[in-house]
Amino acid sequence: MRPGKIVTLAVLVAATCIVNAGPAFCEEYSSGALKSISAVTDRMMIGAPVTEDQAYYMSAPDITKPAAFPNATGYILIGDSRVVGIDESCRINATPDNHFVIAAGGQGYDYLREKAFPAAEKIEKAYPQIKRWKYIVNIGINDMSNLYKYMGLLGYQGTLKDIYVVSVNPIVDDPAFTAIGCTNESIADFNRKLKDTVNVKYVDTYSVLMLEGYDTLDHLHYTDKTNRRIFELIKAAVP
């Protein structure tokens, strides 16, 4: 990930975070920005040119490229800027295989419902030769107040798709984050409840990172080493 811009994001996070009906981390993007993110995502998915600024803190695969492993299971990792970081560290979308990433910085429940799940279905339709699909959802740090909305949406999607939900991973304690109610304790509480979502399988990477340790660039986004470890844990948990 690009360190210079990550520092800028950290400052922006501290300046724009609010508490709304419980610990909400950051409501950085307006609905208008979500429309812009959706438009850029659509262009990325058909291989159309986008500028670096448009694509910044976003991940989407070019589904015009052929599937490298047509008989394998397809995996779609969905999330926010932390998942963008995993994609950049592990080069998931850049590697022609059966793993795909749909993610955008600062996003949460609305993005998951309105853009990410529909985009994942487009990926499925683009590769009909892949018969089995698994959706891996790692999102929530930006709007933990939407916990029960997440549980409802994921529970419903779990009746239609093979859904794995990954724990929200830890931060490094920071007074700016603590001031708006985001601590590792509040994240752990979110995860305890998220784990009870019906019709999905839960992947607990949070506990492993807390046990093994982890490194961040800005108290929120992880280093390449930690991103690779998270992806390694996800792949081990999602056969």
Image (cartoon, grey):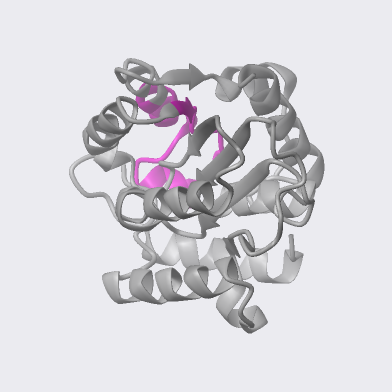
Q: Is residue 207 left or right of residue 1?
A: left
Vertical placement of 168 versus 47: above or below? above
Q: Nearest the camera: 175 or 190?
A: 190
**Can you name the residue that lies furthest to the left here?**
21
Q: Quadrant of the N terminus?
A: bottom right
Tally the marks: 0
Give coordinates of residue 17: x percent, y percent: 37, 58
**Can you name the residue that lies furthest to the front here?**
129
Q: Nearest the camera: 105 or 116?
A: 116
Give coordinates of residue 36: x percent, y percent: 40, 77
Q: Nearest the camera: 117 or 141?
A: 117
Vertical placement of 37 versus 185: above or below? below
Residue for point 44% across, 43% down: 141
Vertical placement of 9 versus 43: above or below? above
**Stretch of the chain drawn in magenta:** 163-190
| Residue 172 visible, this angle | no
Which quarter of the figure has residue 81? bottom right
> Does the magenta portion include 186?
yes
Q: Is residue 69 left or right of residue 20?
A: right
Q: In this view, does 113 lie to the left or right of 87?
A: left
| Residue 17 visible, this angle | yes
Vertical placement of 217 versus 145: above or below? below
Give coordinates of residue 211: x percent, y percent: 68, 16
